[in-house]
Amino acid sequence: MISYRVDGPFVILTTNGKSTDSERALVFEALRADSKVPDGAYLIIDIREYEIRLTQAELESRVRAMVEALAPKIGVASAVLVGDSSLRIGLGLQLVAGNLNFRVGVFHDEASARKWLAPGAPRT
């Protein structure tokens, strides 16, 4: 499952890790085409319900595909929301994205992620 919602300047992408390459590509395409998503949107990736384990190669492939697909629409940084069981994936995502010159912060709650991404943005 993978989905997104728009909340002002923020886009919250939620996934449990069980989506296919084509499902992810369709969601990324929809996000890019969505007129409610502003250029330079603040991306929050919620993986707190992540249910699968990925190899390093799989993680690198997924992160690269996401960054390449969303780069035209999102800013140069993202926040990742993790739970205890998804912390390893979140830290791996942070490392892989950093190698792509894409900054990622890892957080346990959405309020902290929003504050880090956009300190002056209105809170909901």
Image (cartoon, grey):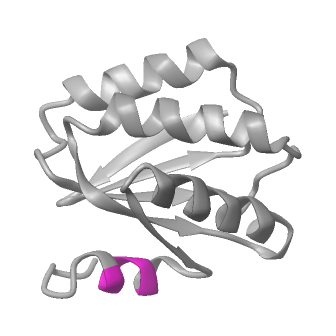
Task: Tell me: 21 left or right of 71.
Answer: right
Identify which residue is drawn at 21% across, 23% down: 33
Is residue 115 magenta-colored?
Answer: yes
Q: Is residue 46 left or right of residue 50?
A: left
Residue 8's spot in the image, x, y percent? 18, 60
> In this view of the protein, which residue sits in the foreground, 55 or 50?
55
Say if 120 sits above or below 93 in the image: below
Quadrant in which the N terminus is drawn: top right
Tell me where the magenta segment starts and ends, as one range.
112-116
Name, please, the residue furthest toward the top. 22
Q: Position of residue 65 (x, y in %)?
A: 49, 29
In the image, is 87 to the left or to the right of 120? right
Measured along the vertical axis of the image, is residue 70 above or below residue 120?
A: above
Counting every numbered tag in the picture gives 0
The prevailing secondary structure element of the residues shown in magenta is helix
Quarter occupied by residue 87:
bottom right
Residue 69 image position (x, y, % from top left): 36, 28
Q: Residue at x 49, y 54 (%)?
A: 99
Quadrant of the image containing the C terminus? bottom left
- In this view, the residue in front, 101 or 87, is 101
Q: Residue at x 75, y 34 (%)?
A: 58
Q: Is residue 3 magenta?
A: no
Task: Give left or right: position of 61 versus 8.
Answer: right
Residue that appears at 36% across and 56% down: 101
Using the rendered view, name the quadrant where residue 39 is placed. top left
